[in-house]
Image: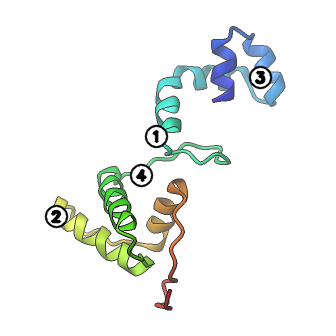
Amino acid sequence: MDIIKLIDAKFKRKDIADKYGIDVSTISKLYKNREKITKNFHSSLLVADRKQMRTSVYTDVEEALLKWFKQTRAAQLSISGPMLAEIAESLVKEMGLLDWKCSNGFLERFKKPHNIALCCSRRGSQC
């Protein structure tokens, strides 16, 4: 975002590239994709320390799961990893996605950009 702001402020791309130690072509690619980058930055799909923008193939599942998560937390109910996985799998079935299992990797990639920390471990410990 800082690079995009500098380009918008009419700084020379060569100077920006030198400052960040990257190619001018990278600056051009960032600027070309600035709308997508800005949208994702503001929608919290990017984590501040992440260098690459990765979005999920299952964005509909993530959106529905996040909505459920926020409603459940607003009701001050505790949520465990296995519970989150169960809800994700039930949402997937409702959406008609076949052969999908909620993996640990999916859960981690879901939790990190939303700063979600669960009170229970996946081993079933009590909160």
Q: Is mark 3 on a helix, strand or loop?
A: helix
* Mark 3 crowd level (few <14, some 14–19, many ≥20, 10 Å Cα): some
* Among numbered discs 1 and 3, the one appearing first in the sequence: 3
Q: Is mark 4 on a helix, strand or loop?
A: loop
Asked if disc 4 and disc 1 are in contact, CB closer than 8 Å, the reply is no
Q: Which amino acid does label 4 sit on?
A: Ser
**Mark carried by residue 43:** 1
Residue wearing tag 2 = 94
Mark 1 touching mark 3, by CB under 8 A?
A: no
Which of discs 1 and 2 lies nearer the camera? The answer is 1
Query: Amino acid type of disc 2?
Result: Glu
Amino acid residing under circle 1:
Ser
- Work out whether residue 8 or residue 120 is closer to the camera in this orientation and state it: 120
| CB contact under 8 Å: marks 3 and 2 | no
Identify the residue at horizontal 18%, vertical 59% (top origin): 95
Q: In which quarter of the image is residue 97?
A: bottom left
- How would you rate the neighbour count of disc 2 (Cα within 10 Å): few for under 14, some for 14-19, many for 20 or more? few
Q: How crowded is mark 4: few (under 14 residues within 10 Å), some or many (20 or more)?
A: few
Mark pair 3, 2: CA separation: 47 Å
Label 4 to label 1: alpha-carbon separation = 14 Å
From the image, tell me which residue sits under label 3. 17
Which residue is the site of mark 4?
Answer: 56
Whole-angstrom CA distance, mark 4 to mark 2, is 18 Å
Residue 50: percent from left, percent from top: 64, 47
Q: Which of marks 4 and 3 is nearer the N terminus?
A: 3
Q: Is residue 21 left or right of residue 54?
A: right
Dot 2 falls on a residue whose secondary structure is helix
Q: How crowded is mark 1: few (under 14 residues within 10 Å), some or many (20 or more)?
A: few
